[in-house]
Amino acid sequence: MIVMPFASVATPTLVVGVMAIVVGLTEVVRAVRTRVEIGHPAAGTASQRRPPFHARPHAQH
């Protein structure tokens, strides 16, 4: 740290930044995969996907 003070500060900052980007991309991929898996019913089930909107309005509206 005494010989190269700027490099000793820049290196951990760069490593943490790269790790944060990798973790962020991994989380995005996992979220998309989870979203896709939720949309598909399990094998052997006859259930249908629920519609995103109900045909009837809520009673309070």
Image (cartoon, rainbow, N blue to C red):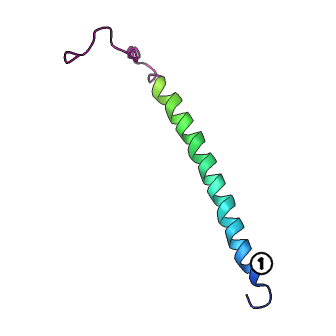
**Residue at image location 62% in from the left, 57% down from the top:** 20
Placement of 13 over or under 29, stated as above or below: below
Does residue 50 appear left or right of residue 13 in this picture? left
Q: To which residue does mark 1 refer?
A: 7
Residue nearest the viewer, comparing 11 with 31: 11
Q: How many marks?
A: 1
User: Few, some or many C-alpha atoms within 10 Å of disc 1 (few <14, some 14-19, many ≥20)?
Assistant: few
Q: Position of residue 6 (x, y in %)?
A: 76, 79
**Of residues 51 and 60, the one drawn nearer to the viewer in this rendering:** 60
Q: Does the magenta stretch include residue 41?
A: yes
Q: Which element carries disc 1, helix, strand or loop?
A: helix
Q: In which quarter of the image is residue 10?
A: bottom right
Looking at this rendering, what residue extends furthest in the left direction? 59
For the point 55% across and 35% down, the residue is 33
> In x, y percent, where is residue 56?
28, 9
Q: At 71% across and 66% down in the image, what residue appears?
A: 14
Which one is in front, 28 or 7?
7
* Quarter occupied by residue 60: top left
The quarter of the picture where the C terminus appears is top left
Which residue extends farthest top? 55
Identified by mark 1, the residue type is Ala
- Residue range corresponding to the magenta coloring: 40-61
Query: Is most of the magenta stretch helix, strand or loop?
Result: loop
- Left or right of 2? Residue 17 is left
For image coordinates 50% across by 31% down, the residue present is 35
Residue 40 position, x and y percent, is 48, 23
* Residue 4 appears left or right of 18: right
Residue 13's image quarter?
Answer: bottom right
Does residue 14 sit above or below 52 in this rendering? below
- The quarter of the picture where the N terminus appears is bottom right
Name the outermost residue toward the right. Answer: 3
